[in-house]
Amino acid sequence: MSYSLVPVPIGSFQVNELISRQDIPITNCDSQDVFGMIAGKPSQPNQKSVAFSLVVPTYNESKNLAKLVEVLSQLLNGYFEGNYELIIVDDDSPDLTWQVGLELMPTYPQLRVMRRQGEKGLSTAVIRGWQASQGEILGVIDGDLQHPPETLINMLDAIANGADLVVASRHVEGGGVSDWGFIRRILSRGAQMLGLIILPNVIGRVSDPMSGYFMVKRSAIANYPMNPLGYKILIEVLGRGNIKTVAEVGYVFQERQEGESKVTWRQYVDYILHLLRLRSRGRISKIREKLHVPIKRFLSFGLVGLSGVFVDMVILYLLSDASTLHLGLTRSKIIASEIAVINNFLWNDLWTFRDISSQQTGGQKRVKRFLKFNLICLFGIGLNLIILNLLYNYLHINKYIANLMAIAIVTIWNFWFNLKLSWRVTQTK
């Protein structure tokens, strides 16, 4: 028995309000490949919706699939009493992951399997699954067991409390990574910082925009065109959907037990291209809520910054003035800025971000917070130097006034990035 679906050009996808349609753009399907099949029966367009559809995009995950399906089924059966669907979307894995999924279907009646041929990519796999799903709530979880399934319960509770989007985050209370190396941490944070520069109103809405573990109400993205690139489908949902309320739940990212990691440099390139695509098309205007700035914390940060200004100005004078050491302006500014950074970190750690730092006790964690703070401020120092030299050497403004102007601009830089990146929980026992 065949089930024909009309193909459409790949590149622009849209989640339909209808539960299941025969014109969903999935190609090369037969009676075993068609998504929308439960125990051999294709879904009907007028079939009643279910509460939750969880998509699991897979590629060469045959060793992990059985365990994952078992754990997810137990959790969701307890929460929904069968009123859900678990969707495997496999990109025609050479290890026959899709075949393993088909063999599991008789044991798990809520399980569905889709084998994609001629199209690959994690983000598009998620969209394809959502297109043919029936759930009022749509979710995604990795197939490699690095996302703890138990976190789904807290995420579903957050949806029940009114959130349009719930993100499982490594950077809020209860979150972390189990065993990441220094380079991987730098790459992850660097990608987030780049995103904040290119798409601040999108990336800044969540603490972990790189997360591939989240769920969203169908009504928040239905009939909004989706054109994802690479692995970061969450950015697409935030940038193009009608997401009013966002919640975050902490989770600990686990190391892979079976199979090989699929993260390559190509994913980082796709991430940058994805950000630029969203930016260039002006989709940010679809986010209707302006970025929320915590005024009280900002004022505290500003007062700490004023103390840093005093320290900076005194040290700059002592180092650069003709009556003292008379060092060069650039060298003096670098030293003065670093001393001011140390001053600012201590006060911010004890006061501005005390509610967060008190949960991360210990000298080692304080050193890590300082290194992150210092790294952000180093970027600010570079910006400060450029502005100071421009104002002093080219516009001939008094060096102290020029320094004050440069500090004012860099203060905004430092607050924004420290608000989004520093004092985050990134390691757990």
Image (spheres, rainbow, N blue to C red):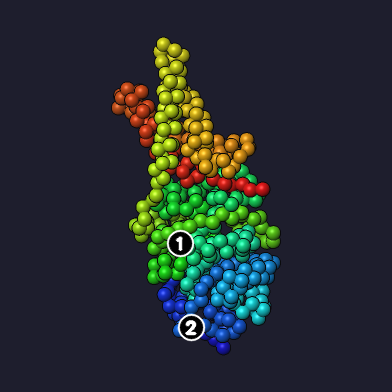
Q: Which mark is residue 47?
A: 2
Three-letter code for the amino acid on which mark 1 is drawn: Ala
Asked which secondary structure carries label 1, the reply is loop
Along the viewing direction, whichever of 219 and 258 lies nearer the viewer: 219
Q: In the image, 97: left or right of 214?
A: right
Q: How many marks?
A: 2
Work out whether residue 320 or residue 134 is closer to the camera in this orientation and state it: 134
Q: What percent of the width, then of the height, locates residue 323?
A: 41, 11
Q: Say which quadrant the N terminus sits in.
A: bottom right
The quarter holding residue 219 reads bottom left
Which x, y percent locates residue 321?
41, 15
Outermost residue toward the bottom in this view: 1
For label 2, the SS is loop
* Disc 2 to disc 1, C-alpha distance: 26 Å
Residue labelled with disc 1: 163
Which residue is found at the position 45% from the left and 17% from the top?
Answer: 318
**Residue 412 locus on image (x, y percent):** 39, 38
- In the displayed structure, would residue 100 be above or below residue 424? below
Which quadrant of the view contains residue 281? bottom left
Whether residue 88 appears in this view of the structure is: no
Instruction: Name the residue located 44 percent from the left edge and 12 percent from the top edge.
Output: 324
Give the mark nearest the N terminus, 2 or 1: 2
Dot 2, how many residues are within 10 Å of its Cα: few (below 14), some (14-19), or many (20+)?
few
